[in-house]
Image: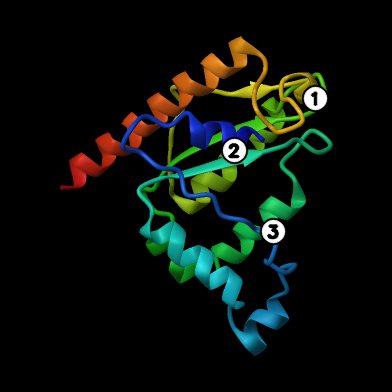
Amino acid sequence: MLLLAAAGSMPQGVSLDIASIHEIPLYDADVESEQGIPAPVQELKDRIAAADGLLIVTPEYNNAMPGVLKNAIDWLSRPAADIPRVFRGLPTGVIGATPGMGGTILSQASWLPVFRVLGVLPWFAGRIIVSGAGGVFDESGRIIDPGTADRVRIYAEGFAEFVQQKRRSQA
């Protein structure tokens, strides 16, 4: 729901392309060496490599990043020689929502060592940590809390500007 809210809050002229990790299998080095990179992984790698920026939206499970999302990044970083093509210097933001009261502070922090290995350009000027998500979104996934809606809009605008600045500096 937070991802959809972020997509809907992007400034005019900026789009957020939403991708799923549902088709990505559990990482298995034997599968990689015998069969190569699975098609859903390769497709997502190519989409990320072609993107101007990457926004990761994460819940928090047991005070850390969710395993399935980390698994997706593990596949996306294979083979290691692809890391520069897919991730190096890519403006990257991370936001999160959880039904718990702690927000996603620990989950977002657990991404930092991964970002370092990938060589992304993390955006630290904004933060979205939504706790008690069940009371923030309605049944259709829209934000019903005005303060959260404002924070998401401000974050989306700032992240979009960060991505556009990076793109302008490369031109």
Distance, label 2 to label 3, CA atoms, is 19 Å
Pointer 1 residue: 134
Residue 26 location (% of width, % of height) = 75, 67
- Can you say whether 152 is above or below 80 in the image? above
Residue sitting at 60 percent across and 71 percent down? 40
Residue furthest bottom as drawn: 34
Q: For the residue marked with disc 1, what is the amino acid? A: Gly
Q: Is residue 36 left or right of residue 48?
A: right
Q: Is residue 161 left or right of residue 86?
A: left
Pick the front one: 101 or 75:
101
Residue furthest top as drawn: 147
Residue 114 location (% of width, % of height) = 58, 47
Pointer 2 residue: 3
Binning the other alpha carbons within 10 Å of mark 2 as few (below 14), some (14 to 19) or many (20 upward) gives some
Residue 84 location (% of width, % of height) = 39, 61
Provide the secondary structure element on which disc 2 rests.
helix
Distance, label 3 to label 1, CA atoms, is 26 Å
Q: Earlier in the sequence, mark 2 or mark 3?
A: 2
Q: Quadrant of residue 47?
A: bottom left
Provide the secondary structure element on which disc 3 rests.
helix
Res 126 seen here? no
Provide the secondary structure element on which disc 1 rests.
helix
The dot on residue 71 is 3
Q: Earlier in the sequence, mark 3 or mark 1?
A: 3
Residue 154 location (% of width, % of height) = 45, 19
Q: For the residue marked with disc 3, what is the amino acid? A: Asn
Residue sitting at 58 percent across and 43 percent down? 113
Residue furthest left as drawn: 171
Binning the other alpha carbons within 10 Å of mark 1 as few (below 14), some (14 to 19) or many (20 upward) gives some
Residue sitting at 38 percent across and 63 percent down? 85
Q: For the residue marked with disc 2, what is the amino acid? A: Leu
Distance, label 2 to label 1, CA atoms, is 15 Å
